Image (cartoon, grey):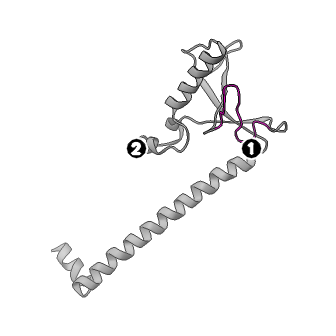
Amino acid sequence: SMRPGSPANLFAYGINCCKHRGSFNCDDAGNPAARYGMVLPEPADILPPLLRDAFPGPSVEDLEAAVRLQQASFGRSIRTQSRHTYVQYVADPLRVEMAHVDTAMLTALGCSLLYLAMLTLAVSSIVLGNGTVGSFFRRLVL
């Protein structure tokens, strides 16, 4: 946890947001009403180990490289031993959160439909291949 006086290394992040050095235009960063920052979660905090590579968003390595470029370009020294926090500037955090919920629900629906199709295909091949499901289960048990 942070203590009073601890440095807060906050960096705005996005994909393909930096044009030339010093120019950042992503999400609501240019909107004066954007007073909120959605913190980029650590994949380890929200995903099981097998799914961490499937995390949608910029990789930690890419973000760290951007921080090093910022340090080299503007001569700002940042403690490398402290953890960096990456934020996405937004004017309406609820809209962004609901977009994440919508994406999760669509992904779950797609996986469910894929499972249903595979199950239907498997049952159909059993029924059509052997004549009846009963003969399949008899062979399975015996």
- Circle 1 Cα neighbour tier, 10 Å, few/some/many (<14 / 14–19 / ≥20): some
Q: Secondary structure at mark 1?
A: helix
Residue 50: numbered disc: 2
Q: Position of residue 116 (x, y in %)?
A: 43, 71
Point 63% across, 57% down: residue? 102
Q: Earlier in the sequence, mark 1 or mark 2?
A: 2
Q: Is residue 91 left or right of residue 118?
A: right
Instruction: Determine crowd level at label 2: few under 14, some 14-19, many 20+ residues with C-alpha closer than 10 A.
Output: few
Query: For the residue labelled by badge 2, is the local secondary structure a helix, a strand or a loop?
Result: helix
| Front in this rendered view, residue 103 or 119 | 103
Question: Which of the 4 image quadrants contains residue 48?
Answer: top left
On the image, the x and y values in percent for residue 80 come to 55, 15
> Looking at numbered disc 2 in the image, what kind of residue is underneath it?
Leu
In the rendered view of the protein, which quadrant contains the N terminus?
top right
Left or right placement of residue 108 versus residue 124 in this view: right
Which residue is identified by label 1?
93
Label 1, label 2: how many angstroms apart (C-alpha)?
29 Å
Q: Which residues are magenta?
A: 17-30
Main secondary structure along the magenta-highlighted residues: loop
